[in-house]
Amino acid sequence: MQQVRNGMGAGAIQGAVWHKSSRSGGNGNCVEIALLDGGDVAVRNSRFPEGPALIYTKSEIAAFLEGAKGGEFDFAV
C-alpha cells in the first residue's frame, strides 16, 4: 500500500478517484475529495490537480462538516 502524506502531489496518489461537488459552479474555485484505501480522505484544489493534497481522517472531515453545517465558520470579514 502506498504511503500517503500531507503535501504530496495529488497526481501521485495512486488509485485516487477525485470528486467535485455537484453544486460547483464550474469556475475553477473548488475543492475535490478522494476516499483513500485506508479510509482517509484527500483534498485538493481543482485549479491545480497535480498540486499538493491535504489528508484527513474520516472523523476530521466529519467534524469539519458538522461545524460548517452548524455555522461555526460563518463569520464576517
Image (cartoon, rainbow, N blue to C red):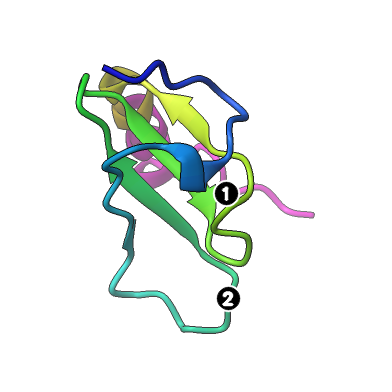
Mark 1 lies on a secondary structure that is loop
**Local crowd size for mark 1, using a 10 Å CA cut-off: few (<14), some (14–19), many (≥20):** few
Segment colored magenta: 63-77
Does the magenta run of residues contain 38? Answer: no
The disc labelled 1 sits on which kind of residue?
Asp
Residue located beneath label 1 in the image: 74
| Extreme residue toward the right, this view | 77
* Viewer-nearest residue: 66 or 29: 29
Q: In this view, does 37 lie to the left or right of 57?
A: left
User: Residue 4, position in %: x, y?
Assistant: 43, 22
Front: mark 1 or 2:
2
The residue at the point 28 percent across, 73 percent down is 22
**Local crowd size for mark 2, using a 10 Å CA cut-off: few (<14), some (14–19), many (≥20):** few
Q: In this view, does 5 lie to the left or right of 37?
A: right
The disc labelled 2 sits on which kind of residue?
Gly
Return the disc, 1 or 2, that comes first in the chain's sequence.
2
| Extreme residue toward the bottom, this view | 26
User: Residue 3, position in %: x, y?
Assistant: 40, 16
The residue at the point 58 percent across, 76 percent down is 28
Residue 56, image quadrant: top left
